[in-house]
Image: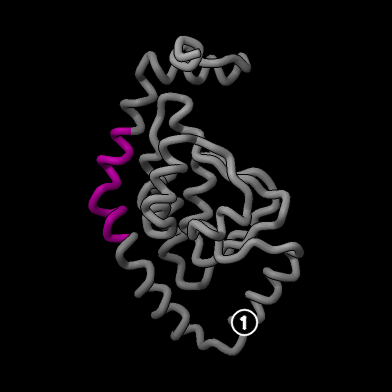
Amino acid sequence: MFLGLLRAIIAHPKPVIAAVDGHVRAGGMGLVAACDLAVAGPSSTFALTEVRLGLAAVMISVPLAARVNSRDLACVLLTGEKFDSAHARRIGLLSDAVEDLDAAVDELVDSFRPCSPQGLAENKALLAAPMIAELDARGDDLAGVTARLFTTPEVAEGMSAFLERRLPSWAADAG
């Protein structure tokens, strides 16, 4: 289901813009990465929190790897640290970090007006082809890893700790 949503965004024949005005976590970052263009306002924050719950960003790894610089992706995947929209822009997750989100989105939409629908669709298809091919080739395996991880005691502990607003046992033992 989620992989289908990612694929639909990536394959859509018209440009898809993510307008981010808030906090983006985990799978939401995959949705942002699946979009053709992504802009965020100054109050937006981002984090790949899966690692802190015993999970991995498996299903969103394809669009993230296509957008985010590899060393930066390793850092955000392996630490789960929160970062701001300026950092998200620097690492490639965002097209732009802006002060006025509505004005930035309006400007992007206006930039498409002189473009031919056929030209947009063909250029989108060129850009999307590698991500779609990888999702199609690896989608079942990616979904399987996610399903397997959700059955582990470590994820149960990570989720319980999150809901109970406490450190998970592995973090409590480390300190």
Where's residue 109, x and y in %?
Answer: 64, 75
Magenta span main SS = helix
Q: Decide if residue 138 is on the left or right side of residue 9.
A: left
Residue at mark 1: 111
Residue most extreme to the front: 175
Q: Amino acid at mark 1?
A: Ser
Residues drawn in magenta = 132-145
Q: Decide if residue 166 is on the left or right side of residue 148.
A: right
Q: Decide if residue 162 is on the left or right side of residue 132.
A: right
Q: Residue drawn 54% across and 87% down?
A: 115
Question: Where's the N terminus, which quadrant?
Answer: top left
Secondary element at tag 1: helix
Q: Is residue 129 above or below residue 87?
A: below
> Mark 1 packing: few (<14 Cα in 10 Å), some, or many (20+)?
few
Q: Quadrant of residue 81?
A: top right
Q: Decide if residue 98 is on the left or right side of residue 55.
A: right
Colour option used: one colour
Q: Residue drawn 41% across and 57% down?
A: 69
Q: Nearer the viewer, residue 84 or 143?
A: 84
Q: Residue drawn 27% across and 54% down?
A: 136
Where's residue 107, x and y in %?
Answer: 68, 76
Q: Is residue 95 above or below residue 64?
A: below
Q: Nearer the viewer, residue 135 or 170?
A: 170
Q: Residue drawn 62% across and 82% down?
A: 111
Q: Is residue 33 above or below residue 24?
A: below
Q: Is residue 77 visible?
A: yes
Where's residue 52, x and y in %?
Answer: 48, 27
Q: Quadrant of residue 68?
A: bottom left
Where's residue 64, x and y in %?
Answer: 42, 52
Q: Is residue 75 magenta?
A: no
